[in-house]
Image: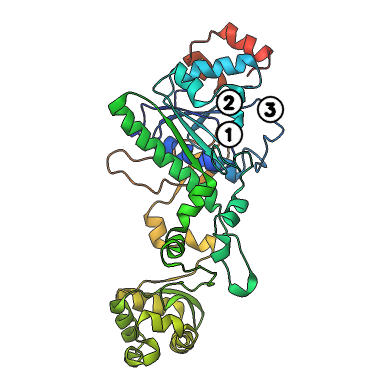
Amino acid sequence: MPAIHAGQALAKLRVLDLSRVRAGPTCVRMLADFGADVVRIEPPPGVDDNENMFVDSREGSDFQNLNRNKRSLTLNLKHPQGRAVLQRLVRDADVVVENWRPDVKHRLGIDYESLRAINPRVILASISGFGQDGPYAGRPGFDQVIQGMGGLMSVTGFPEHGPVRAGIAVADSSAGLYLALGIFAALLEREQSGQGQWVQASLLHAQIAMMDFQAARWLNEGQVPVACGNDHPTASPMGLFRASDGQVNIGVAGSGNWRRFCEVLGQPGWMEDARFLDVKDRIANRAALTVEIERVLGTQPVSHWVEALNRAGVPAGPVYSVPEVFEDPQVRHLDVVAEATSAGGRKRRFITQPVQLSRTPGSVRSAAPGCGQHTDEVLREAGYEDAQIRALREAGVV
């Protein structure tokens, strides 16, 4: 089959994907969705004892989710001929993505200087747990460990329960997205210089960057952020409040929103109450304010308050389970889900690309490939004859 171009924005790009697990594949998925020809390079079965890390099955939802719109080439990089094949592929590549420990690429001769000697225009994009150098460079980086070291767990959950991990892989996913952004910047700069460069992201740095205003509070005001449960640390009322049939998520920020909120709840007196005059007062007296709010909200169901508050311009919404998310009419309108058939013949559903381009949008063109499904065709594109490909197979290179 020809290269998979899920869109036109990046259709001229060839990407070699040496990454695995989540952070690297998240980055490459974005490139693939916008049309880059992505060749996922993975070891032949049995070569890597960690090949099934977090992968129950290639037909499983997680693997399919991360590796759509890609082709697959098996290549044993522990074999000298395997490294020679990769070097040949690098000649025509625009981007190489990897997330090994920093020393691995140097051992294999796939570090930036080695790749640059083959192709000066190539961009090497590397994700690591802690950075390419420094005292922790050799440590393995896992999302949950990084959530703890990057401060996220300290501000997540309820104060009485201690640190809590987020329910998604925040460090992995954000590092992948930051790396994709770096690749786009390097590609744009290459249009001027004609030169590639080494783009780096780490889970630790990405997680700290995602701390955003919480980190800024400490750096600039000396305020130590702590877990606040569902309450916002610097705004009130903002959080979950009980209505008659469940909880409603309400975000009141700014004096205008506070005024409209009081009006919708029929409580203009709150605006004159000394306990609630400004946001600092409302934070200091949050518990008392919550009692007052829930006394009113408890008279009507969640749907009533969501409609009434939004109509007044006050942000509010329900708290969905995952199945409920996909039943929401706005979610359906946004075409958040697309379908493709996997290499095993199963219909799989995917979250579509959340970044929309008006002329050259991304898409989900194909599900994740079978292991080595496109080995022969990729090697032929690189100039290998059928007899040479057979010899590589016999030698255990592919």
State the separation of the CA atoms marked 3 and 1.
Answer: 24 Å
**What residue did someone put label 3 on?**
45
Q: Nearer the viewer, residue 17 or 338?
A: 17
Query: Mark 3 or 1, which is nearer the eye?
Result: 1
**What residue did someone put label 2 on?**
106
Q: Nearer the viewer, residue 305 or 223?
A: 223
State the separation of the CA atoms marked 1 and 2.
Answer: 8 Å
Vertical placement of residue 265 versus 53, above or below: below
Vertical placement of residue 341 versus 224, above or below: above
Answer yes or no: is residue 130 visible: yes
User: How many dots with numbers?
Assistant: 3
Corner quadrant of residue 34:
top left
Rendered location of residue 354, percent (x, y): 40, 49
In percent of the image, x 60 and y 31: which residue is there? 103
Q: Are marks 1 and 2 in contact (CB under 8 Å)?
A: yes
State the separation of the CA atoms marked 2 and 3.
Answer: 24 Å
**What residue did someone put label 1 on?**
102
Other residues around mark 2 within 10 Å, as few (<14) / some (14–19) / many (≥20): few
- Where is the C terminus found, in terms of image quarters? top right
Residue type at numbered disc 1: Pro
Rendered location of residue 183, percent (x, y): 40, 36
Other residues around mark 3 within 10 Å, as few (<14) / some (14–19) / many (≥20): some
Q: Are marks 3 and 1 in contact (CB under 8 Å)?
A: no
Residue type at numbered disc 2: His
- In the image, 6: left or right of 191? right
Task: Describe the colour scheme in one phrase.
Answer: rainbow
Query: Mark 2 or 3, which is nearer the eye?
Result: 2
Residue type at numbered disc 3: Pro
Q: Secondary structure at mark 2?
A: helix
Rendered location of residue 136, percent (x, y): 61, 43
